[in-house]
Image (spheres, helix red, strand yellow):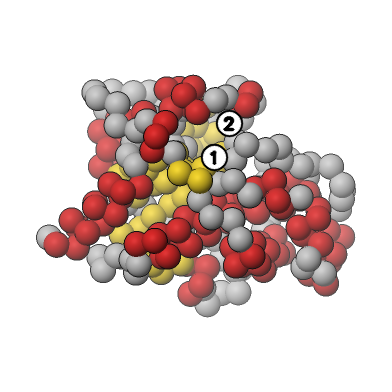
Amino acid sequence: MRQTFKIKDIIELPFNDDIVNKTVNNVIKKYLNTEKNSMYDRKPVELLDNLIMGDIAKNSVIYYIRNKFGLDIIDYDEIRTNNFKNIDPGWDFKIGKNKLKVEVKSSIPPNNENYDSIIKKRDIKITAGHNEITIKPEDIDSDIHIQIYFYCKKYRKGYTNFEKLGNVIENNPEKVKEIVNITKYKTPLFFGWNSKDMIIKFSKTLRTWSFSWSKRIYWHCPIKYSYPIKELITYVKEQEAR
């Protein structure tokens, strides 16, 4: 199979006050409504930081596409009616007239890998389950999957009590930026996208994979066989024309 994503296709996405403030306001609500006992041993600050990274990634993608390409986007966080009490529906936003479902994945390069190594070795992170396959590619909700990388270090230390940290950020939202050092996420890097159809295709020949320290397993969706953002816009418009 021919490599479709190259170093020249990596894009630095926006990071600005609109993105940061939207992220902070929404993450506080998500943090307060997360079932702490369902998290795999994550500490309070670690959970907060994970939520921040995911939302910065998603919000930077939305901001970029809306402002550069003018496509219609429905951000689930903007239309929620449950005050963030329910889990996400399996997608982050819908795009285009056909309302294709999109999920944004966010990661930190292992061992500070360079761009070339990430493209050659890494995948868009598509969850297959914990210990065993519980999510078949055919049952994935999203039509499109995007991978964002940040070169930074996530925080774990600080607050040791979930409720105490929740009270702090609820009463002083600006404190979130300090606790996680939000400026470390100032360079969201777009590392490709792929479709559900391609994930199904990969699953026929490639096994699942996992990290040594985690029970979560993933379907293969190699970044080197994923696509630049311009082809995402083309793909959305082609689906609209059908």
Residue displayed at 35% across by 58% down = 101
Q: Position of residue 242 (x, y in %)?
A: 12, 60
The quadrant of the picture occupied by the N terminus is top left
Spatial CA span between label 1 and label 2:
7 Å
Q: What residue did someone put label 2 on?
A: 109
Q: Secondary structure at mark 2?
A: loop
Residue 132 higher or lower than 173, as above or below:
above
Q: Position of residue 32 (x, y in %)?
A: 72, 64
Which amino acid lies under the numbered mark 1 shown in the image of this protein?
Tyr
Residue 13 higher or lower than 88, as above or below:
above
Q: Is residue 132 visible?
A: no
Q: Is label 1 in contact with label 2 (beta carbons under 8 Å)?
A: yes
Which amino acid lies under the numbered mark 2 shown in the image of this protein?
Pro
User: Residue 93 occupies which quadrant of the picture?
Assistant: bottom left
Residue displayed at 55% across by 46% down = 188
Residue 94 higher or lower than 12, as above or below:
below
Q: What residue did someone put label 1 on?
A: 149
Q: Secondary structure at mark 1?
A: strand
